[in-house]
Image (cartoon, rainbow, N blue to C red):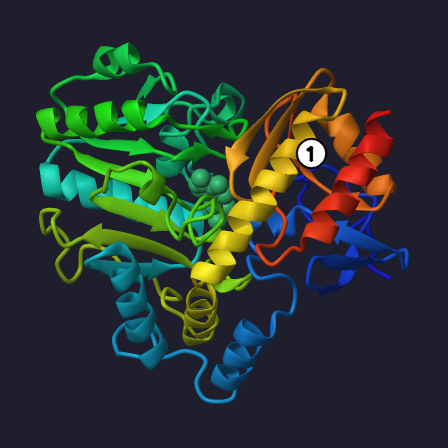
Amino acid sequence: MIALESRLLPTYPETKIGFVEGDGAWLTGTDGRRYLDFAAGIAVVALGHRHPAPLAAAHAQLDRLWHASNLFATEPAVELASLLSDRFGGARAFFCNSGTEANEAALKYARKATGKAGVIALEGSFHGRTLGSLAVTGQPSKRAAFAPLGPARFAIPNDIPSLSEAASDDIGLVLIEPVLGEGGVVPLEPAFVAAASSLARDLGALLAFDEVQTGVGRTGTFFAFERLGVKPDLVTLAKGLANGLPIGCLLVSDEAPRAFAPGDHGSTFGGNPVSCAAAIAVCSTIDAELLAAVRANGARLLAGLSALPAVTQARGYGLLAGAVLDRPAQEVCDAALDAGLVCLTAGPNVLRLAPPLVVGADEVDQALDILTEVLA
Ligand SMILES: *Cc1c(COP(=O)(O)O)cnc(C)c1O
């Protein structure tokens, strides 16, 4: 039994349940019950709990080498960088340990490449909790207690005129999430992304996609930007990349200006061999067949959600789904947990569902049945 009253700092709401074991899309609670997991550790456990591929790869690497630092090459980091470059179509990688660190790397990269400190980001965006990433996070509730924060200007998602209103000469980076995750599962429209891309070009700024949540197959393509017809200079990845082991990554397109030289940036734990070995297995498992299943099950989930009585809109791509509710999302999330389904929220009235990418159609139907019951 886990003591739920603990000596942890209260940065998260009190939890009434702990989990002790996972298997595919299922979790076992401290109460001994089985729960259907449509949260996947906040869109992290991409292939499901204890998926054999990353499990075997991490085990094998644990038995060989845990850490050597970035002063020396290790096979898993070199191979993962090469796999991600192939998926992107020509890029170099910097590895770190989390999403916010990947965004910090992007912020520093753009600042050095352009010599400009300004950033355009989006209202409602989420880029992380460290001070640099927080400065470009467009959510007053997360920023307020930590002002003053660095320079950022916020445009409104899918509002093209608001982009040029945010423009100024000191902008070195335009940073957007292809689908705003924490900000309510809001997909960006291709025309808006195209406008953001041409604004970045006009301003002499870099274009970065924060794919910490949307990347690694979550939306039905390996990168969510593949759906948008715009290739960015920079992409950040983290959550799903190593199936739950800590990892973050900045990808820099071969077409972007060169900026980082030895000494400009670093991370002691970045590129950890065990995390990278698991990530190689994840990337190798995400093939065309799995992506097609993500799109099919995602469509099934969205269709089911939009048919529920309390849902005013269902939106998202692949297995990143948001159901806009006519009532507070946290209440529904709590009731679903009591009924055996683990969900997420994204803002006050959006229920967010992000099951493992390997979830089956039958499990999607089970989740919809539980939500039907909860919303009745
Ligand atoms: C979760 C998230 C982050 C922050 O990732 P951490 O690993 O918690 O630092 C950044 N950007 C997006 C889009 C995210 O969803």
Q: Position of residue 183 (x, y in %)?
A: 51, 27
Quarter of the C terminus within the rendering? top right
Q: Position of residue 373 (x, y in %)?
A: 86, 33
Determine the residue positioned at 34% across, 48% down. Answer: 236
Whether 70 is drawn above or below 31: the answer is: below
Q: Pick the residue in front: 362 or 270.
A: 362
Q: Is residue 152 visible?
A: no
| 371 left or right, relative to 124 | right
Determine the residue positioned at 72% across, 65% down. Answer: 23
Residue 206 figure quarter: top left
Q: Is residue 86 visible?
A: yes
Q: Pick the residue in front: 134 or 297.
A: 297
Whether 264 is drawn above or below 283: the answer is: above
Q: Position of residue 209 (x, y in %)?
A: 32, 40
Residue 20 figure quarter: bottom right
Q: Which residue is mark 1?
A: 304
Q: Residues within 10 Å of mark 1 (few under 14, many from 20)?
A: some
| 360 left or right, relative to 45 | right
Amino acid type of the residue tagged 1 in the rendering:
Gly
Determine the residue positioned at 23% across, 42% down. Answer: 231
